[in-house]
Image: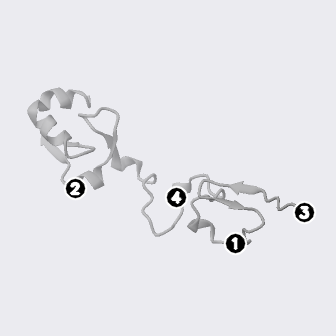
Amino acid sequence: MTNDTQTTSSCCSSTPAQAAPVVEAPVASSCCSTSSANPAAAGNGRENLLDNASDMTTCPVMVGNPVSKKAAEAAGLFRDYEGQRYYFCCAGCGPAFDSDPAKYAANMA
């Protein structure tokens, strides 16, 4: 007699099919939920970072790196230059911007 078990896989785990109990969980609590076109929009008590696109910008120092204006302000990762506010992706970008603000401001034009 053989003990063949098939393994099922997901992005969260790999478990033997025979040992996996069938448990129905609320859709919003699963990282593997397929019922929503946007998994980041699930509740889970977490902020949906994709909902507010107007909050997003890019870092002028590390061109192309996305930055949440709200998060950058909360962390102090911004500088004002010639009446414009520039947001940074990390703490290292502020001093780099300070070294030549005109150069980095031009990256955002």
Spatial distance from mark 1 to mark 4, Cα to Cα? 20 Å
> How far apart, in angstroms, are the residues tagged by discs 4 and 2?
24 Å
Disc 3 marks which amino acid? Met
Q: Mark 1 falls on what kind of element?
A: loop
In terms of depth relative to the viewer, which is nearer, 2 or 107? Answer: 2
- Number of residues whose C-alpha sits closer than 10 Å to that of mark 4, classed few (under 14), some (14–19) or many (20 or more): some
Identify the residue position indicated by label 2 in the image: 75
Residue holding disc 1: 24
Q: Report which residue position mark 4 lands on.
A: 41
Question: CA gap, disc 4 to disc 3?
Answer: 48 Å
Q: Left or right: where does residue 81 sit relative to residue 3? A: left
Count neighbours of disc 3 (C-alpha within 10 A) and say few if under 14, some if 14 to 19, many if 20 or more.
few
Mark 1 or 2, closer to the camera? 1
Residue 71 in picture, x, y percent from top left: 29, 55
C-alpha gap between disc 3 and disc 1: 32 Å
Report the front residue among 82 and 2. Answer: 2
Q: Which mark is residue 1?
A: 3
Decide which of tag 3 and tag 1 comes sooner along the chain: 3
Task: Classify the position of the N terminus by image quarter.
Answer: bottom right
Is residue 84 in sight in this rendering? no
Q: Amino acid at mark 4?
A: Ala
Mark found first going from the N terminus, 4 or 3: 3
Closest to the camera, between mark 2 and mark 3, is 3
Residue closest to the far right? 1
As drawn, the label of residue 15 is none
Cα separation, mark 1 vs mark 2, equals: 39 Å
